[in-house]
Image (cartoon, grey):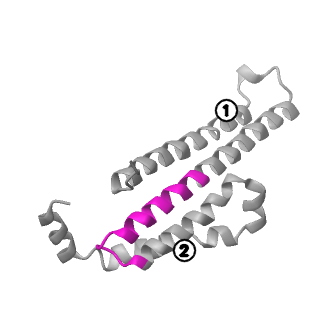
């Protein structure tokens, strides 16, 4: 039985992406503690503390790469759902899928670094979608029609 991609699938994937982003930010907090150089760290010299802070910052970078790759997957799912829906223009779904492909390059950071800034420029699809929703919104007639059909 094939898996059906729905808005629920997209929402679940976005929840995981948010959790990954929050986890990546957690690696920034120890940097503040280490560089504040409190009494608990008085046994370390300045070079050791700076090296430890750099380790945490590098872990943050790696965790951010994982988040961006997963967020790219979420954009592709969301783009597919938009493409299949009748509430928004299909081009918005295509642009969101393209943005997801750009973010997914962070699965392999050397590729992402090589393609930078072009891979992130593909994220313009997210901006176009946000602008469309702010200015035009969804097609209300189609929304009500689909709701009355029980979809």
Residue 89 coordinates in the image, percent (x, y): 36, 79
Membership of 82 in magenta stretch: yes
Per the model, the C-alpha gap separating discs 2 and 1 is 36 Å
The residue located at (70%, 45%) in the rendering is 62
Q: Which residues are magenta?
A: 69-90
Q: Which mark is residue 76?
A: none
Q: Is residue 134 above or below residue 45?
A: below
Membership of 148 in magenta stretch: no
Image quadrant containing the C terminus: bottom left
Disc 2 marks which residue? 124
Q: Which mark is residue 33?
A: 1
Q: Is residue 132 above or below residue 60?
A: below
Q: Nearer the viewer, residue 151 or 24?
A: 151
Residue 13 coordinates in the image, percent (x, y): 45, 49
Q: Nearer the viewer, residue 75 or 149?
A: 149
Looking at the image, residue 97 sits to the left or right of residue 64; the answer is left
The residue located at (66%, 34%) in the rendering is 30
The residue located at (50%, 48%) in the rendering is 17
Looking at the image, residue 51 sits to the left or right of residue 80; the answer is right
Q: Nearer the viewer, residue 133 or 103?
A: 103
Looking at the image, residue 106 sits to the left or right of residue 91; the answer is right
Q: Main secondary structure of the magenta part?
A: helix
Circle 1 Cα neighbour tier, 10 Å, few/some/many (<14 / 14–19 / ≥20): some
Tell me which label, 2 or 1, sits earlier in the chain.
Answer: 1
- Number of the front mark, 2 or 1: 2
Q: Nearer the viewer, residue 84 or 45?
A: 84
The residue located at (85%, 33%) in the rendering is 46
Residue 35 coordinates in the image, percent (x, y): 73, 36
> SS for tag 2?
helix
């Amino acid at each position: 039985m094939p898996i059906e991609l729905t808005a629920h699938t997209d929402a679940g994937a976005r929840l995981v992406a948010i959790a990954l982003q929050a986890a990546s930010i957690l690696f920034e907090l120890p940097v503040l503690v280490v560089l504040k150089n409190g009494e608990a760290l008085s046994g370390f010299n300045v070079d050791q503390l700076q090296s430890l802070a750099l380790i945490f910052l590098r872990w943050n970078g790696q965790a951010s790469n994982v988040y961006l790759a997963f967020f790219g997957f979420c954009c592709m799912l969301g783009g597919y759902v938009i493409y299949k829906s009748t509430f928004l223009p299909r081009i918005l779904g295509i642009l969101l899928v393209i943005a997801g492909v750009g973010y997914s390059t962070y699965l392999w950071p050397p590729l992402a670094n090589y393609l930078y800034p072009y891979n992130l420029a593909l994220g313009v699809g997210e901006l176009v979608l946000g602008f469309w929703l702010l200015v035009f919104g969804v097609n209300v007639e189609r929304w009500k029609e689909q709701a009355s059909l029980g979809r």
